[in-house]
Image (spheres, grey):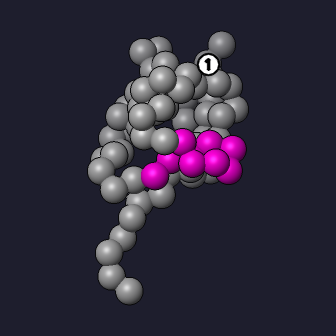
Amino acid sequence: MVMKIYINNSEIEPSAGCATVLDVLRQQGLDTDGVAVGIGGRVLPRSQWSETPLAEGMRITVIRAVCGG
C-alpha cells in the first residue's frame, strides 16, 4: 500500500526511503531555509522535523518567509 500525505493541499506519495517530515521536504526539493512547517494547525519546531514520522493522510503546511512589505 502506498502512503499518501498532503503538502499545502497537494497529494504526495513519499518514496520508500521517506520516513520523516524532513525526508519528504527534501524529496520534494523544497529549500528549508526561511521556511516554517505546520502539522495539524500547529508549528512544528525545526528541531523535530527529522524526528517526526510521516503518517497516512498527514497534512503538512509549508510557509516561506518573504521580505518586503
On the image, numbered disc 1 is attached to which residue?
2
Q: Which residues are magenta?
A: 36-44
Give the residue drawn at x 33%, y 46%.
32
**In the rendered image, which quarter is residue 55 located in?**
top right
Residue under the image location 61 percent in, 18 percent down: 2
User: At 50% from the left edge and 47% from the top edge, which residue is drawn?
Assistant: 37
Answer with the quarter of the image where residue 28 lies.
top left
Instruction: Specify the quadrant that holds the N terminus.
Output: top right
Query: Is residue 68 rendered to the left or right of residue 16?
Result: left
Relative horizontal placement of residue 13, taking residue 64 as reference (left or right): right
The extreme bottom residue here reads 69
Rendering coords of residue 40 (x, y %): 69, 44
Residue at the spot 69% in from the left edge and 32% down from the top edge: 57
- Main SS category, magenta section: strand
User: Could you tell me residue 47's position as x and y percent?
Assistant: 42, 34
Residue 7 left/right relative to 23: right
Q: Is residue 1 above or below residue 37?
A: above
Q: Position of residue 23 (x, y in %)?
A: 41, 27
Tag 1: Cα neighbours inside 10 Å, few (<14), some, or many (≥20)? Answer: few
Query: Is 32 colored magenta in this rendering?
Result: no
Q: Secondary structure at mark 1?
A: loop
- Quarter of the image for residue 30 reads top left
Amino acid of disc 1: Val
Q: Is residue 15 visible?
A: no
Q: Quadrant of the C terminus?
A: bottom left
Give residue 21's position: percent from left, percent from top. Answer: 49, 31
Do we see residue 21 in this rendering?
A: yes
